[in-house]
Image (cartoon, rainbow, N blue to C red):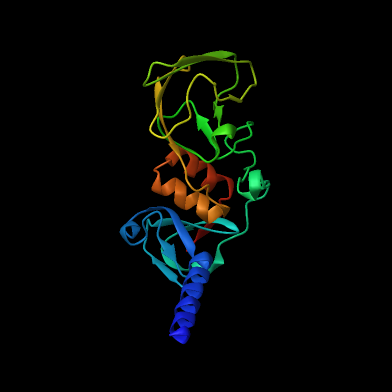
Amino acid sequence: MVRLLLSAASAALLMTSAAAAAVLVVRSSGPSAGAYPPGKALSDTHTLKLKGNDMVVLLDSRGTRTLEGPGNFSASASAAPAAGAVRTAGTNSRRVRLGAVRGAGSRSVWQADVGQSGNVCVANPGELTLYRADASAAATAKLTDAAGNSATIAFKPSQWDAPWPAEIPVASGNRVGVTGLGEPTTMTLKVLTPIPSGLEGMAQSLIRADCKAQLDVLIDTFSTRSGG
C-alpha cells in the first residue's frame, strides 16, 4: 500500500513538473486557431505545424514569441523577453511589474485602463491603479459603480496613472462606468484568488477571467516574432 502511495505521489510530482515546463498559447488566429486556442498548454517537445495566415503567440517563463505560418516551429524555442522589458518582484514575489509599453507611460499588468471596456483582473486590491493611454493634456474622469458610488479623478498633463479611488469598492463583479475621457467605458472588476505567480500563471489567470486588455499588455511587453 505504501509503495502504491509513493508511486502515485511520484506520478503527481512528474505531472506537476511537466505542467510547469509547458508552453502556453496566449493568442492565435488563422486556419489553425482552433487547434491552438488561448490557454492551451503545449509540451516543450511539441512541434507546431502552421499554415499560411496562421499566427500563434506562445508564452513560457522566458517571455513570449509570435509564430507566423507557414512553417514548423518548436514550442520550446520561446524567445527571451524583448529588449527594454523589466521584471521586478513585488509583494511576496508574486507581483510582476512590466516595463514601458504603448507610448511613454509605464504600464503594469495590474492597472485598469480607463479607456477600454471589459474585465479588469485584480491581483492585490490595495495595489490597483488607473491608467490612461493619452496623457497629452489635463483631463477629468468620473467613475461610477453599479451601487451608485462615484469618484472624480483629475489627471494632470503627462500624468498616465492615478490611485484607485477609495470611494469605489474593489470587489469581484463590481461594474464601474467611466466618463469624461472620450467615449464612455465600463470596467468589470475580477479579483483573482489565489494571486497568480510567474508569467504563465499570470497569463492563464487573465485568459480564464477574460481580461483581454491586460493580457495584451503582458503579450506586447515580452513579444518577439518568428516567421516561417
Q: Position of residue 159 (x, y in %)?
A: 63, 22
Q: Residue at x 37, y 56 (%)?
A: 53
67 lies above or below 99: below
Q: Position of residue 66 (x, y in %)?
A: 50, 55
The quarter of the picture where residue 111 lies is: top right
Q: How many marks?
A: 0
Question: Can the viewer see residue 44?
Answer: no
Q: Position of residue 156 (x, y in %)?
A: 63, 15
Q: Nearer the viewer, residue 139 or 226?
A: 139
Q: Nearer the viewer, residue 45 or 153?
A: 153
Q: Residue at x 47, y 82 (%)?
A: 7
Q: Residue at x 49, y 81 (%)?
A: 6
194 lies above or below 21: above
Q: Is residue 72 left or right of residue 108?
A: left
3 lies above or below 37: below
**Quadrant where the image shows the N terminus:** bottom left
The quarter of the picture where residue 182 lies is: top left
Q: Nearer the viewer, residue 120 or 25?
A: 120
* Extreme residue in the front direction: 1
Q: Position of residue 172 (x, y in %)?
A: 41, 35
Q: Is residue 19 left or right of residue 105?
A: left
Q: Nearer the viewer, residue 123 or 220?
A: 123
Question: Can the viewer see residue 134?
Answer: yes
